Image (spheres, rainbow, N blue to C red):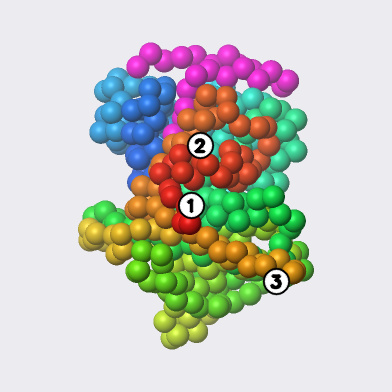
Amino acid sequence: MTETSGTGATAGESRTNDEVWIVGATGRVGRGVTARLAARGLTVVPVGRSRERMVAAGTAAGLPGDAKVVVADSAELIAAEIARQRPRVVVNTMGAFAATAPVIARACMPGGHYVDPAADVVAVEGLLALHDEAVRTGSTLVTGAGFGVLATEAVVAKLCEGRPAPHRVLVDAVGSVAVEAGVLGAALAASMVDVLTAGGRRYENGRLVTSRLGADPRRLAFPDGEAAKSAGVASGELVAARAVSGAPFVTATSGLVPTAPLIRALLPLLGRLLSVPALRRLAVDRLGRVRIKAAPRPRKHSWGHAVVEWPDGTRREGWLRAGDGMDFTADVTATVTELLARGVGRPGAWTPAAALGTELATTAGGTFVPD
Ligand SMILES: NC(=O)c1ccc[n+]([C@@H]2O[C@H](COP(=O)([O-])OP(=O)(O)OC[C@H]3O[C@@H](n4cnc5c(N)ncnc54)[C@H](OP(=O)(O)O)[C@@H]3O)[C@@H](O)[C@H]2O)c1
């Protein structure tokens, strides 16, 4: 690959080169996104802390052996390289998004674009808070570019099309993911610990309020005849469903939250324990090293689901069907990235369907049920 040099943009300039940087290109999501974008002919540059691992992962993903890589091992150092070299789009899959996303996204401005698959309330709200800055600098920032947020947000947006703001929205995200053999990994471990420490959230009268993690456990019967359990969580889906609908009352559940009564009863205590910084570090470290066995995905489909209610009693329900949840996440991140690289997308900070429309969900391989 030929290395393209940055233009050294100063404040007010928005020139970028034609590169798409993948932060975390050796990880599960990063590898999938790298392979998809390389196959679509984009100039992909892996960014991470080990040159050797990036070259190996890049080659496996279809990049030439001598492809450019950028070596940097923290969000701050990565941001400094972005500011120096000016890639057109940066995809962040390094995790810990509440901390890393604002640092990396700010470095993309002016004019460069940013994408991440964050799925927690703090990270999604934090990135959306950069909206005015992004509008001023002509950058498009997309957070939540993964299964959970898009699969629910797109259904809510479709159900609300051409109607006034509803009174109440309920969204459920139940992914079905094949497990790769190997270690769990620090990024995923950190996300799991963050879910436990964040506890639950819901919107009441338009305000984000605390609720219990694992509240409102439910059994979902999917349109394909399969079923799964889900329970309340403080997720990016919640923020996206509120933003796209304008409903004052919003709740979100996820298939990732344990629904067994004993475990649900222990979740608040576990969350409090893991809020202690030393225990959090220990838990992320230990969990990240856990070796897991390969396993097929438990159900054929991943499902996003929404129920929307209006003050006059009208109630509408819809689904988005996808295949493997991890593959769909890589498809969504890659599709958003490709669109931004090609100049599609309005300046601002958005969730994926808000940035690029509900059809993004079908472009990325999902199917609305009913159509
Ligand atoms: N929205 C969704 O539906 C969805 C779905 C899947 C995943 N996710 C989220 O996406 C994130 C990535 O998941 P994953 O399964 O791909 O994780 P992963 O396999 O652990 O990959 C993490 C990547 O980040 C890199 N990295 C970690 N710390 C770094 C640092 N300090 N400097 C530079 N690079 C660093 C790792 O590089 P090394 O090779 O050096 O370790 C690796 O390439 C997680 O936060 C996960 O929760 C969201």
Q: Amino acid at mark 2?
A: Val
Is residue 146 placed above or below 19 in the rendered structure? Answer: below
Q: Which mark is residue 275?
A: none
Residue 18 spot, x, y in % from top left: 50, 19
Residue located at (35% from left, 68% from top): 225
- Quickly name the residue at label 2: 336
Q: Amino acid at mark 3?
A: Gly
Q: Report the span colored magenta.
A: 1-24
Instruction: Say whether residue 61 is left or right of residue 250.
Output: left
Task: Indicate yes or no whether the magenta region holds residue 134.
Answer: no
Residue located at (48% from left, 80% from top): 264
Residue located at (48% from left, 48% from top): 146
**Regarding mark 3 in the picture, which secondary structure is present there?**
loop
**Label 3, label 1: how far apart the Cα atoms are:** 23 Å
Q: Which mark is residue 371?
A: 1
Residue 295 spot, x, y in % from top left: 23, 60
**Of the pair 359 and 44, the residue shown nearer to us:** 359
Residue 24, image quadrant: top left
Task: Indicate yes or no whether the magenta region holds residue 20.
Answer: yes
Comparing marks 2 and 3, which lies closer to the viewer? Answer: 3
Q: Which mark is residue 313?
A: 3
Q: Is mark 2 within 8 Å of ligand 1?
A: no
Q: Amino acid at mark 1?
A: Asp
Looking at the magenta stretch, what is its main secondary structure? loop
Tags 2 and 1 in contact by the CB under 8 Å rule? no
Tags 2 and 3 in contact by the CB under 8 Å rule? no
Q: From where the camera sits, is residue 17 visible?
A: yes
Q: From where the camera sits, is residue 49 visible?
A: no
**Label 2, label 1: how far apart the Cα atoms are:** 22 Å
Of callouts 2 and 1, which one flags the residue occurring earlier in the amino acid sequence? 2
